[in-house]
Image (cartoon, grey):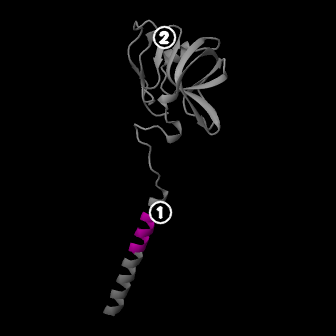
Amino acid sequence: MRCHLSAQFARSIARLLTCLFLAIATISLNAQPTQSATQPPLALRYDKAHEITLTGTIEGVNEKPETGSPVGLHLMVAASEGTIDAHLGPYMTKETLEALHTGMPVQIVGAMKKLHGKEYLLARQVIFGGRLVQVRNENGLLVQAHTAKSHRGNQKSGLVSNGGAR
């Protein structure tokens, strides 16, 4: 009888350890590495060596881009090169969003990037209506707080933070 209980206990422990091993293996296989908070997705890395300045007219302001395009505000800009999709990111202030409109002249400093077969201008700075809006820092990382400044350097408003999940 004692031998029977001991064997039964050993089988129970073996089953428990097998289930535990399978659970750990399943979790490990389903886990995905997270993006570093300081690094953009590999596909959207900013190439400051190929930075350009684009001058044109806003044809459209799109806060909800199509699936597969970078998240955040997009400006469709008519320029001598054709219509360019400029990505301004998800951190625009309400004041900036209200100031951008169709027909407005705009100057954008940024770098072109191809994603899913489509070209985007990853904006670093946007100049419109006498304002300079910093979208990305010199390394191309999106900034979460913007200071609206006149193009001449006079400050118009304070620092506004638009952090948080969307």
- Residue 60, given in percent of the width and then of the height, sits at 65, 20
Answer whether residue 58 is magenta in the image.
no
Q: The disc labelled 2 sits on which kind of residue? A: Arg
Work out how far the residue at label 2 is from the one at label 1, CA to CA, in angstroms.
52 Å
- Res. 21 visible in picture: yes
Residue at 55%, 33% in the rendered image = 71
How many numbered circles does the render carry? 2
User: Can you identify the residue that label 2 sits on?
Assistant: 131
Q: The disc labelled 1 sits on which kind of residue? A: Thr
Instruction: Return the residue nearer the eye: 158 or 110.
Output: 110
- Res. 60 visible in picture: no
- Quadrant where the N terminus is found in the figure: bottom left
Q: Residue furthest front?
A: 49
Mark 2 or mark 1, whichever is nearer to me: 2
Residue at 61%, 11% in the rendered image = 104
Label 1 SS: helix
- Residue 13, given in percent of the width and then of the height, sits at 36, 77
User: Can you identify the residue that label 1 sits on?
Assistant: 26
Residue 6 falls in image quadrant: bottom left
Q: For the magenta stretch, what is the residue range?
A: 16-25
Residue 116 falls in image quadrant: top right
* In the image: residue 109, left or right of residue 104: left
Q: Residue furthest left?
A: 2
* In the image: residue 13, left or right of residue 57: left
- Residue 111 vs 154, above or below: the answer is below
- Residue 40, given in percent of the width and then of the height, sits at 46, 37
- Residue 113, given in percent of the width and then of the height, sits at 57, 33
Predominant SS of the magenta segment: helix
